[in-house]
Image: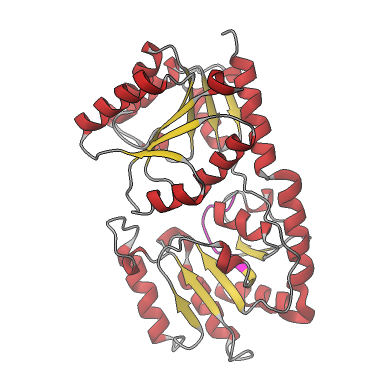
Amino acid sequence: MGSTEKTIVLGLEHFIDKIGYQSDEYKRRGIPIKYLVNDVSGISASKAKQYSADIDIVSRNLLARTIKTVVIFITYRPRWCEIYDTGRLTLFYTLIARIFRTKIVIILRGQEFNRYGSRAFGLRLSLKLCHHIVSKESNLTKSLLCLSINRDKITEISNCVPLPKMTAINNDRDIDILFLNSVRQERHVDILLNAIKQLTEQVPNIKVVITGFSSLDDNQHQVDTPYEEKILTMIQDLNLNYNVETHGFVQEPSQFYKRAKIFVLPADVIFLNYSLLEAMSYAVAPIVCNGEGADEIINRENGKIVGFSSLELAEGLQEFFADHQYVSYGKVARDNIKRYHSMHIWGEKMISVRKSLIGK
């Protein structure tokens, strides 16, 4: 494919695993791709090295970032431009790509239509000017249609993950329950803690790992500090220090997935949460609360859906542990990822988008 497929990606807050997956898939298909990223998490350089990705970490200064972008367009001469709407420069990115006659694909991930003022105006104008839009959620597609954007200009491509090389669950897994997501109010970690407290009455040695406490990290990317403090205090008050191990954001989540038996996500929004998909790809049995889209990814064979109740969650977890049911559920979960949510499928859909734009 070579230079005709050279791609630049703009607007990312940082380079993390989910972008690394895409980088690897493009690389596998022979597509050169360059990322211009901010670095709010402080791990972009190390993650880019892990994936051998071509990235430039840009300045937080808007003027410096605009100059850098123009220079890259002049020197790199991309034929394709993927834009994420995460800041105030979305419209600028769209206009500069237009000037350089670059095909523009805007990728929407979920919070874009919560913008106001100049940012909302810039996004809406960019959506009109771009060549195509990739929507990760059906509700985003509905919002786009309400803006009178042609349905033919929109492709829904949901989150996908690589399928790791591994065997199914074995006896080496020493984490009974894993929560691996940012700790925030809408993910109801308090329900999980109360369920764990109930479980300790029958299983006093149960081992639980909760990751995603931004307040435990040494960086400026804080998520929901008051709620994190509430959860850390709850662990103390419920006397769960022996059972619950806490971490900040983990750079190598695979090391936890490989050790886990059950993955818990008691969140308001479930559908295609990245960590949920990753856990399932490692044959970790999922149990989720009945948040938005839960039944679109979890069924009776690959996991469990419970109500927003610590009692229901505790009962569901007990069922998983009975006769090691989590093993069979984990196997089906991994098979579902392979069939419906692998990076190969993501790559096929993105290539299809490009083919549809050739000549336009």
Q: Which residues are magenta?
A: 263-271
| Left or right: where 314 falls relative to 170 | left
Image coordinates for residue 84, horizontal then vertical, percent = 42, 33
Q: Foreground residue, 107 or 290?
A: 107
Q: What residue sits 20% from the left and 29% below the top? A: 63
Q: What residue sits 51% from the left and 78% below the top? A: 194
Magenta highlight on residue 270: yes
Applied colour scheme: secondary structure
- Residue 357 vs 190, above or below: the answer is above
Magenta highlight on residue 314: no
- Residue 168 vs 120, above or below: the answer is below
For the N terminus, the quadrant is top right
Image coordinates for residue 171, horizontal then vertical, percent = 72, 79
Residue 360, image quadrant? top right
Q: Foreground residue, 165 or 237?
A: 165
Q: What residue sits 54% from the left and 40% below the top? A: 23
| Left or right: where 312 falls relative to 129 | right
Q: Tell me if I can see residue 290 in this picture.
A: no
Image coordinates for residue 58, horizontal then vertical, percent = 30, 38
Image coordinates for residue 333, horizontal then vertical, percent = 73, 58
SS assignment for the magenta stretch, majority: loop
Q: How many marks?
A: 0
Q: What residue sits 32% from the left and 66% below the top? A: 215
Q: Tell me if I can see residue 339 in this picture.
A: yes
| Left or right: where 270 falls relative to 87 | right
